[in-house]
Amino acid sequence: MYKSSDKICDLMSQEEDAIQIISRFGLAMGVGEQTIEQVCDTHGVHTQTFLSVVNYKLFKVRPNPDTIDIPTLQRYLKNAHTYFLDFRLPRLRRALIEAIIPADPSTKIPGLILRCYDEFVAEIRTHIEHENAGLFEEHEHDDERITGKLTEIKNLIIKYYPGASSRQTGEDRVRSAEEGSITYLLISVMSDLWHTEQDFADHCAIEDNILRPALTKIQPSVHHTRQLTETEELSDREKDVLIQLVRGLSNKEIADVLCISTHTVISHRKNITRKLNIHSTAGLTIYAIVNKLVDLNSLE
């Protein structure tokens, strides 16, 4: 296990995953002979939280929740989100297109493989949106299913990618050389798929085994604080959701009316319930009428 007094250059040169971890904490190259603690202090990163992620990812050692600085860990996770959505997943899609589209044009398999990948990316995006909103409970059991989609894509390529038939002519030998290059691209994509799957699985494990326990540790005090505060004001979008809710619309119908996702509707409903401390539809209807968000005629 790594300690705060270890040189960070040793960590970076000896552990492949360390470079990725360091970048997500906002640290940079050019560290010289500085220790982990010195570099973390320079960049305003909580040293023990940094070490907790490093030692968990490399050695699967679960940290004491009391040693975690939650804002530091949340910044780390959000930087990982940016990396996945803005860089790794779009780059992997481009590589996938380059590798599979030159296959036999008479088959639809390459297009179907790409569609499976796009569905996977959509699920990742929803997962990350919920995580950023703090809705961990809504995707608590989704991690394996999402990473399983990458396994499915790998298996589709392995089992059903349309291979080229053997050819004998000089022109065909040229084509075979080109197909060899495509094979190398395909191997590279398979490697990228595997690393992406592992990276995302590790990311979810850090949520489950470091962030969740740390949040659970402070949860009672958070609830106590909320009980002492006045009712929080609803946002304009939350009011829009409330209006449609008391009119009897389902989550899906509200999503269609407001042009937002069903998951976003669920998120707003949770916020409404928490802010108003009203759990029944009847109670929410009374609140909406009293606060002139709806009138009886509109409900009728």
Image (spheres, rainbow, N blue to C red):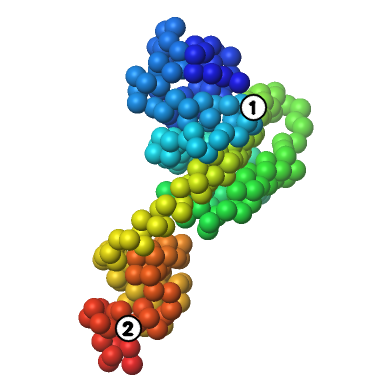
Q: Nearer the viewer, residue 131 or 286?
A: 286
Q: Secondary structure at mark 1?
A: helix
Label placed on residue 59: 1
- Whichever of callouts 2 and 1 sits on the residue coming sooner in the sequence is 1
Label placed on residue 44: none
Residue identified by numbered label 2: 286
Q: Position of residue 266 (x, y in %)?
A: 44, 65
Residue placed farthest to the top in the image? 33
Q: Position of residue 167 (x, y in %)?
A: 75, 31
Q: Could you tell me the amino acid type at mark 2?
A: Ile
The picture quadrant where one finds residue 193 is top right
Q: Nearer the viewer, residue 35 or 106?
A: 35
Q: Could you tell me the amino acid type at mark 1?
A: Phe
Q: Is residue 25 visible?
A: yes
Instruction: Look at the picture and state if 113 lies above or below 84.
Output: below
Measure how far apart labels 2 and 1 are at the Cα level.
Answer: 54 Å
Name the quadrant of the N terminus: top right
Q: Secondary structure at mark 2?
A: helix
Q: Position of residue 169 (x, y in %)?
A: 73, 26
Name the residue located 51 percent from the left edge and 26 percent from the top edge: 51
Name the residue located 54 percent from the left edge and 44 percent from the top edge: 213
Instruction: Look at the picture and state if 262 lies above or below 66.
Output: below
Q: Position of residue 159 (x, y in %)?
A: 75, 43
Name the residue located 50 percent from the left edge and 37 percent from the top edge: 66
The picture quadrant where one finds residue 296 is bottom left
Q: Is residue 214 left or right of residue 111?
A: left
Q: Residues within 10 Å of mark 1 (few under 14, many from 20)?
A: few
Q: Is residue 39 left or right of residue 147?
A: left
Q: Residues within 10 Å of mark 2 (few under 14, many from 20)?
A: some
Instruction: Look at the picture and state if 247 lies above or below 110.
Output: below
